[in-house]
């Protein structure tokens, strides 16, 4: 559990810096597009890769810190144990089913992209899709592992009768 949480923490910490790089890259591109009429070739692909990497690789960090958006209109008034049971149900019914399916299909797409040298046809640059497919697989595998850790921690929360903020 400690190794998975360490991995999620370090990944989230390093991936957060990509937002700065993406902001600088997009600002540079806007300046060149309007000031010199020369946008960067492959800007769409590069910004998609940067943003996807930032967004997806930060998912496990968000789950680790319980920073995901929750609407506690109904369950906010429930006891901590009732909220923990509700989270168990949602992890079991929605989270694990959905993330497991994404990992399964992402693994298949990753293998196909790596073995067939699949290229993106969205822009003339035509970058390889293997890095994107690998990143999707790794991000959702990390999210699945962090979800398992969270469920194990929820068992302890249930025993204590308290849920962290």
Image: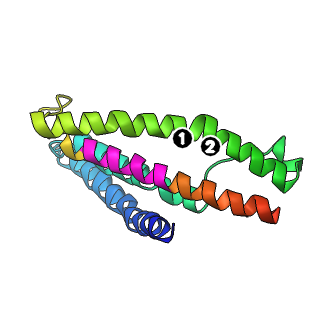
Q: Are marks 2 and 1 in contact (CB under 8 Å)?
A: yes
SS class of the residue under badge 1?
helix
Q: Is residue 74 left or right of residue 108?
A: right
User: Would you say the magenta stretch is mainly helix, strand or loop?
Assistant: helix
Which residue: 32% across, 54% down?
27
Residue labelled with disc 1: 96
Give the image quarter of residue 164.
bottom right
Magenta range:
132-145
Work out whether mark 2 precedes mark 1 in sequence or the reverse, and give the earlier one. Answer: 2
Residue labelled with disc 2: 91
Q: Is residue 5 magenta?
A: no
SS class of the residue under badge 2?
helix
Mark 2: give few (<14), some (14-19) or many (20+) Cα within 10 Å: some
> Residue 90 placed where, x, y %?
66, 40
Q: Is residue 71 visible?
A: no
Which residue: 34% across, 50% down?
138
């Amino acid at each position: 559990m400690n190794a998975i949480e360490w991995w999620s923490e370090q990944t989230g910490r390093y991936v957060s810096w990509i937002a700065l790089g993406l902001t600088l890259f997009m600002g540079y591109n806007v300046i060149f597009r309007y000031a010199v009429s020369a946008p960067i070739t492959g800007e769409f692909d590069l910004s998609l890769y940067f943003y996807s990497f930032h967004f997806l690789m930060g998912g496990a960090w968000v789950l680790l810190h319980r920073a995901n958006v929750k609407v506690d209109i109904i369950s906010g008034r429930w006891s901590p144990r009732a909220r923990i049971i509700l989270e168990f149900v949602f992890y079991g019914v929605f989270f694990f089913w959905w993330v497991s399916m994404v990992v399964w299909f992402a693994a298949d797409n990753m293998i196909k992209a790596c073995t067939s040298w699949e290229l993106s046809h969205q822009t003339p640059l035509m970058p390889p899709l293997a890095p994107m497919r690998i990143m999707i697989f790794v991000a959702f595998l990390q999210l699945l592992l962090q979800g398992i850790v969270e469920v194990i921690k929820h068992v302890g929360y249930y025993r204590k009768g308290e849920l962290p903020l």
